[in-house]
Image (cartoon, rainbow, N blue to C red):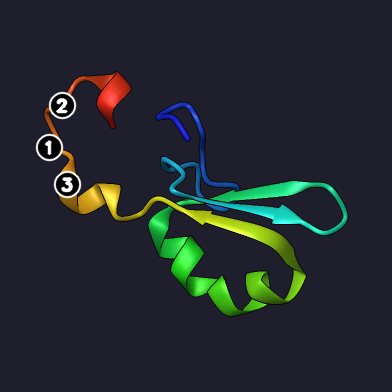
Amino acid sequence: MTAADRCDRCGAQAYVRAVLASGGELLFCAHHGREHRDALREVARDIQDESRKLASTSSIAPVDER
């Protein structure tokens, strides 16, 4: 995911992508990804969670590194 991917709930940078069994996808920030984790597990074919990047990327890093 890139900094251009935005959370479907609040518009913040997305760190969680859920690919649904129906073929669609949902993007969530780390907060909303955690909030909806259990429900996503029931309907998602795959969940990509990159929230670990929050702890390892400096807030002043270039945009392409966030």
Could you tell me which residue is drawn at 40 percent across and 50 percent down? 50
Total labels: the figure holds 3
Q: Are marks 2 and 1 in contact (CB under 8 Å)?
A: yes
Could you tell me which residue is drawn at 40 percent across and 29 percent down? 3
Q: Please give the residue where the numbered disc 1 appears in the rendered image.
A: 58
Mark 1 is surrounded, within 10 Å at the Cα level, by few (under 14), some (14 to 19) or many (20 or more) other residues, namely few
Q: Are marks 1 and 3 in contact (CB under 8 Å)?
A: no
The first of marks 2 and 3 along the sequence is: 3
The circle drawn on residue 61 is 2
Q: CA distance from mark 2 to mark 3?
A: 10 Å
Q: CA distance from mark 2 to mark 1?
A: 5 Å
Q: Is residue 57 left or right of residue 14?
A: left
Q: Position of residue 19 (x, y in %)?
A: 70, 52
Q: Position of residue 14 (x, y in %)?
A: 46, 44
Mark 3 is surrounded, within 10 Å at the Cα level, by few (under 14), some (14 to 19) or many (20 or more) other residues, namely few
Nearest to the eye among marks 2 and 3: give it: 3
Q: CA distance from mark 1 to mark 3?
A: 7 Å
Which amino acid, by three-letter code, is at mark 1?
Ser
In the image, residue 32 above or below residue 51? below
Q: Is residue 25 left or right of residue 24?
A: left
Could you tell me which residue is drawn at 28 percent across and 21 percent down? 63
Q: Position of residue 46 (x, y in %)?
A: 66, 58
Q: 47 or 27, which lies in front?
A: 47
Q: Are marks 2 and 3 in contact (CB under 8 Å)?
A: no
The circle drawn on residue 44 is none
Which amino acid, by three-letter code, is at mark 2?
Ala
Could you tell me which residue is drawn at 28 percent across and 32 percent down? 66
Q: Position of residue 11 (x, y in %)?
A: 50, 42
Secondary element at tag 3: helix
Which amino acid, by three-letter code, is at mark 3?
Ser
In the image, residue 39 above or below residue 19? below
Q: Please give the residue where the numbered disc 3 appears in the rendered image.
A: 56
